[in-house]
Image (cartoon, rainbow, N blue to C red):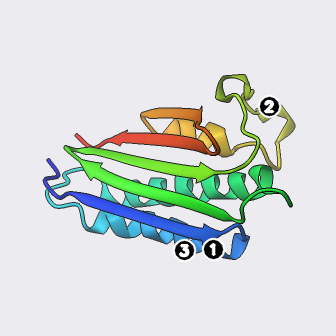
């Protein structure tokens, strides 16, 4: 059980030099989980991975000259549910049409969403009025 309540809201420029910062915030959150009985090291790695991949995807795919130059990331822990949200102002995409990677071809890229889906318990992507939200949920019990 994780009785700690955490709410973090971070806005970074769309530059790859900030990816390490976003990943390390995920790791730091794990250190603050009171009463978490699971593997902290594995969870810290997973949060670093998914936050870095999600932010990298925004920088690579959603950022263009016409978009806003920021990525917003929120992290919320409530009732043993860790919810990560990544907001962008790009064109958006249909999460259900993203194909699984071709492992036989040893892809150099295109693994981000596959990794995110593999690690998280729930993944959704929605388009709001003028922004997109990638929502990632991890159940901690």
Quadrant in which residue 12 is drawn: bottom right
Q: Position of residue 48 (x, y in %)?
A: 50, 61
The residue identified by callout 3 is 21
Q: Residue at x 63, y 54 (%)?
A: 53
Residue designated by label 1:
18
Residue 26, given in percent of the width and then of the height, sits at 43, 63
Q: Nearer the viewer, residue 3 or 43?
A: 3
Q: Position of residue 31 (x, y in %)?
A: 29, 68
Contact between marks 3 and 1 (CB within 8 A): the answer is yes
Quadrant in which the C terminus is drawn = top left
* Most distant residue in the top direction: 96
Q: Which quarter of the figure has residue 81? A: top left
| Distance (Cα) linking label 3 and label 1 | 5 Å
Observer-nearest of 113 and 58: 58
Q: Earlier in the sequence, mark 3 or mark 2?
A: 3
In the displayed structure, 26 sits above or below 57; it is: below
Q: Is residue 41 left or right of residue 37?
A: right
Q: CA distance from mark 1 to mark 2?
A: 29 Å
Q: Residues within 10 Å of mark 3 (few under 14, many from 20)?
A: some
> Residue sitting at 72 percent across and 65 percent down?
69
- Residue density around tag 1, few if under 14, some if 14–19, many if 20 or more, within 10 Å: some
How far across and how far down the image is residue 65, in percent?
Answer: 86, 61
User: Which class describes the residues within 10 Å of circle 2: few (<14), some (14-19), or many (20+)?
Assistant: few
User: What element does badge 3 sit on?
Assistant: helix
Outermost residue toward the front in this view: 129
Q: Which residue is mark 2?
A: 102
**SS at badge 1:** helix
Which residue is painted at 78% across and 55% down in the image?
A: 60
The picture quadrant where one finds residue 34 is: bottom left
User: Which mark's residue is nearer the viewer, 3 or 2?
Assistant: 3
């Amino acid at each position: 059980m994780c009785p700690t309540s955490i709410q973090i809201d971070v806005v970074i420029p769309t530059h790859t030099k900030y990816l390490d910062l976003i990943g390390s915030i995920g790791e730091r959150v794990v250190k603050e989980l009171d009463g978490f009985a699971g593997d902290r090291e594995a969870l810290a790695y997973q949060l670093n991975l998914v936050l870095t991949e999600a932010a990298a995807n925004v920088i690579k795919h959603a950022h263009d000259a016409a978009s806003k130059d920021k990525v917003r990331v929120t992290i919320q822990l409530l009732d043993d549910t860790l919810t990560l949200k990544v907001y962008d102002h790009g064109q958006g995409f249909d999460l259900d049409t993203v194909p699984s990677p071709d492992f036989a071809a040893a892809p150099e890229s295109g693994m981000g969403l596959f990794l995110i889906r593999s690690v998280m318990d729930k993944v959704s992507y929605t388009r709001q009025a003028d922004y997109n939200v990638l929502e990632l949920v991890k159940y901690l019990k």
